[in-house]
Image: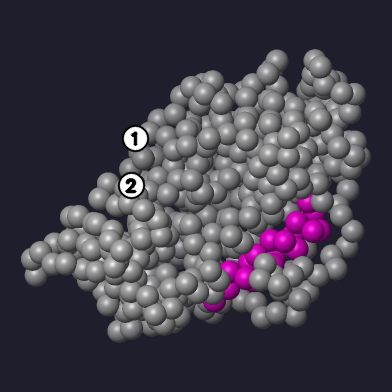
Amino acid sequence: MISTTDTAIIGAGPYGLSISAHLSDIGVPHQVLGEPMFAWRNFMPPGMLMRSEAFASDLYAPRAGYRLEDYSRRMHLPYAPIGMRLPLERFIEYGLWFQSQLVGHVRPVEVTELRRQDGCFRLSLSDGSCLIARRAVVALGLKGFEYMPAVLQGLPSPGVVHSGVFGSLSWARGKRIVIVGGGQSALGLAALFNELGAHVRVLIRGDTITWNKDPDVGRSLISRMLSPEGGLAQGWYPYVLSEFPYLFRAAGQRLRRRIAETSFGPSGAWWLRDRVVGKVELSMNTSVEHVSVHKSGVVLQVTGGDGPATVTGDHVVAATGFRVDVAKHAFLSPEIIQALSLVDGWPELSGHFESAVPGLYITGPAAAMSFGPALRFVYGAKYAAPCIARHIRLRHAAEGGSRAFQPQGAPQVLAEGGADAQLHPPPAFQGVKSPAE
């Protein structure tokens, strides 16, 4: 079965849902492909707290009433913009509520191939169907970009696993867990594993851990003027990076790379310190030289301030971050990958998030080298969603709208349900269960 639409959004996370809400508001037919909040529901450990402050954890609609604060008020849940420990489960439930209110046209399918065809995009889907679209928006997160150091590569799972592939951690009770890394992911997992009853040791390359400062709630007006609260952190530098991504893009590629590589390095959230320090074994100045997996467990040869040592565990978790490489998206055809002209895996994007392939937009973490570190977080959708939607609307109008779009060989239908189905939200919210229910 072949259907058509103006715009296909690949990904139904915070970026994809926010872009869809804006496109619906301005009348651009589109389809969202993917399960809503899929990565958050399946690859994040239950009990995790969001690193960003609550005010920086919104999905973005074109009109008021759909922020996390609005959802919390509606559900009679406590809310504070700063200083609130926001559970992962609350964020997921909020995202599903946002989707239920504003994004009714989600197809829970995977894109198996995206390629160019006759000036459009042909998307092959996991349910065997095909979608042809004028435009495509890749709105995915970090899944698939997990970075594994050479010393840990090629080792069998579950002996050695990356921190980006976890769901439930219940399997770790009573186990010996060795975590390699010193940032938020490493420290957050260390706290959760320890609280589940695992024996945890964290191997950190540096000589210290950078802890984020406790939030300063109730600051004076002068204090807020001298050091404004940005979506990334407090202070003028993070505020500018948070609120004005187009200024980051205006910088030269060399300066952008320097900012991206030196800003907001590994650190731990303010609410983690008391859950880690004094409760988990932390080994500083430690480098992993060799790892082997045996039936009895995993053996690591490490060097540190006290010289060579052997560390053993049942599992090793590589909390070693992510490295964007758009070529790792297996659904992108070789022709599209080649046309993107990637630089170290990063796509160069226009001021509207359009790639070197006309009509193909890329947003989320893969856009961070073009628009700054805010795009690595949910907060970046505040800028990306309306920016992309405005550009698509102008293109859509210039091309004569929906009725002018009829690719060769496609059926005489805009999309499943017709054009009007794309413009109306679903029935009123009746309650969203958490993924665990």
Q: Considering the image in quadrants, where does the N terminus appear?
A: top right
Residue that carries the numbered disc 2 in the rendered image? 154
Dot 2 alpha-carbon crowd within 10 angstroms: few under 14, some 14 to 19, many 20 or more: few
Residue that carries the numbered disc 1 in the rendered image? 254
Q: Nearer the viewer, residue 287 or 94?
A: 287
Tell me: residue 331, above or below residue 278: above
**Which secondary structure lies at badge 1?**
helix
**Most common secondary structure along the magenta stretch:** helix
> Residue 310 magenta-drawn?
no
Q: Is residue 222 visible in this depiction of the protein?
A: no
**Which secondary structure lies at badge 2?**
loop
Amino acid type at circle 1 is: Arg
> Residue 96 magenta-drawn?
yes
Residue in the image at 63% along x and 67% along y: 91
Q: Is residue 233 visible in this depiction of the protein?
A: yes
Dot 1 alpha-carbon crowd within 10 angstroms: few under 14, some 14 to 19, many 20 or more: few
Tell me the CA gap for discs 1 and 2. 33 Å
Q: Which residues are magenta?
A: 85-103
Relative placement, left or right, of 305 versus 37 is: left
Q: Nearer the viewer, residue 385 or 310?
A: 310
Q: Quadrant of residue 275?
A: bottom left
User: Furthest residue to the front?
Assistant: 295
